[in-house]
């Protein structure tokens, strides 16, 4: 896996070659990762996007489950939240 500073994106040949060689590239800002680029086949853009979105959704669900396991919500809190949402216009 290769890392590249966002300021270096103007080096398009390096970006393209890295994606062709490795298939992925982690973009950094101030030395910290903030985005990932994936190489794809031109005729598979919709399928690739669908798979990436599915993976991101699964990751979000896992994170939510971990958070709820650490800080469980009581039935009373859930009921209060439901009642509050129902009162909103």
Image (tube, grey):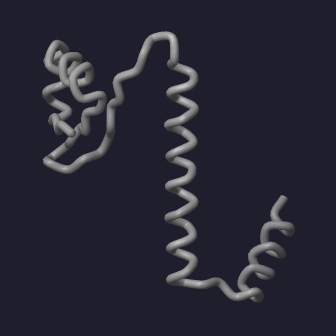
Looking at the image, residue 65 sits to the left or right of residue 9; the answer is: right
Counting every numbered tag in the picture gives: 0
Viewer-proximal residue, 85 or 47? 47
Q: Residue at position x 20%, y 42% from top?
A: 28
Query: At 35% across and 29% down in the image, what residue appears?
Result: 38
Residue 82 position within the rendered picture, expressed as x and y whole percent measured from the top left: 80, 73
- Whether residue 78 sits left or right of residue 44 in the image: it is right
**In the image, is residue 48 above or below residue 43?**
below
Between 4 and 77, the one lying in front of the other is 4
Q: Is residue 67 above or below residue 61?
A: below
Q: Residue 33, image x and y in percent?
A: 24, 47
Rendered-image quadrant of the N terminus: top left
Give x and y (percent) for residue 85: 79, 67
The quadrant where residue 41 appears: top left
Which of the two residues, 70 or 83, is positioned nearer the viewer here? 70
- Above or below, 43 against 87 in this view is above
Residue 35 appears left or right of 50: left
Task: Judge left or right: residue 77 versus residue 52.
Answer: right
The residue positioned 45% from the left and 11% from the top of the image is: 42
The C terminus: image quadrant: bottom right
Q: Residue furthest front?
A: 21
Q: Nearer the viewer, residue 51 or 77?
A: 51
At x 56% / y 25%, what residue is drawn? 47
x and y percentages locating residue 88 in the rendered image: 81, 64
């Amino acid at each position: 896996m290769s890392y590249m500073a966002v300021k270096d994106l103007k080096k398009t040949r390096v970006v393209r070659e890295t994606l062709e060689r490795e298939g992925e590239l982690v973009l950094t800002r101030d030395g910290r990762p903030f985005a990932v680029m994936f190489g794809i086949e031109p005729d598979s853009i919709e399928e690739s996007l669908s798979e990436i979105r599915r993976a991101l959704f699964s990751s979000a669900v896992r994170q939510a489950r971990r958070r709820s396991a650490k800080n469980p919500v009581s039935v009373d809190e859930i009921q209060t939240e439901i009642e509050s949402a129902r009162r909103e216009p």
